[in-house]
Amino acid sequence: MLRPRTDPRLRLEALSALSGCDVRATSGASQLSPQDFVNVVVLREFYRQEGLQQLEYQGLGTMSLQDPDQDQDLYSSPCALTEGPSSSSSSSSSSSGPRPTMRINPEDFFHPEYDYDFTNIKDGAKTFLRGNEPYVRPCGWRRLGLRVTRRYGDDDGWLGTGAAAWPVSYQGRGMDGSLGVILTRAAGGDEPGFLDAAAAALAGGATRGRGVYSAADVATAEAYCKSFRSDVDGKTYKVLLQNRINPDQRRRCQRDGVWLVYVPTGLNDVQTRALVQDAMRPYGLLLQEA
């Protein structure tokens, strides 16, 4: 297996850029799991789409949903990533609001056994399947494995290649209703709330569906990924998450290869988080030099 050698500090910078938090290493237990991490990434985009200003997340507190890079250099580097007291802690604030600190233990957050270097791989006409659906491998990227085996019970079939496996999707920090997709009726079984939302979008000329977006093709997700300039080596990187998506929880969009995890109106924050956790599980952090 082609395992990329990636500086541990660069891994933390990538997590920081993707989550909007200051991610720091600790020798103790990780503050949040990989599942919590993907929750933060996708929920911040969902709540921004809903017009909210802040996200409350257990273990992190309150985080601003205003993108700190919105009016700044897109490639500005994140804050220092050394463990210990910092002016960037969750109690501090800036023009974009608080930037909470997330502490992880790299030993229990990353799973190097599943690192893979796709940088110089070109699949061409080769085809791969996950969950009996086409899997577009992230050629041109380095994948850093996340420690998710046995985190969802004893059965890791969702992560495999057999019939019980979930399909692959890619998630970027900027993936929301701005993708310009209009919801379409899937084949049977759609709940009324979803169809009402689709009808309203069509009638009003809106392009948004209410929920969390991801893409089946890494090239689609790349167009909405987060970039950052590393303090470690001075290079600029793009960063994405590689996930498995529950085939029973996703909805097709009019744009081919874009998935929506629909969030019905009326759910509270706890219910919304539970829905996301049932639908999307991360297993890889992707890096590519910009």
Image (tube, grey):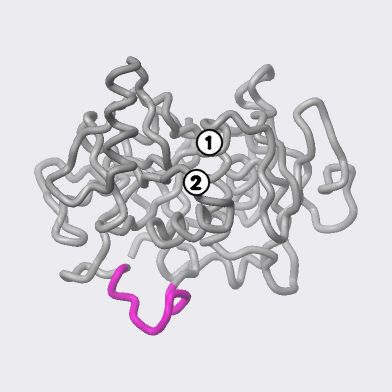
Query: Where is residue 213, by image quadrant?
Result: top left
Residue shown at the point (30%, 69%) measured from the top left: 158
Mark 2 sits on what residue? 266
Q: Give the crowd class for mark 1: few <14, some 14-19, many >=20 residues within 10 Å.
A: many
Outermost residue, left side: 125
**Residue 150 belongs to the span the image colors magenta:** yes
Residue shown at the point (28%, 43%) measured from the top left: 192
Left or right? Give the position of 232 relative to 14. right
Residue shown at the point (39%, 33%) measured from the top left: 222
Query: Where is residue 36, by image quadrant?
Result: bottom right
Q: Which of 205/125 is in front?
A: 205
Left or right? Give the position of 35 relative to 152. right
Query: Where is residue 223, by image quadrant?
Result: top left
**Tag of residue 237:** 1
Q: Position of residue 3 (x, y in %)?
A: 41, 61
Left or right? Give the position of 202 relative to 264. left
Amino acid carrying mark 2 in the image: Gly
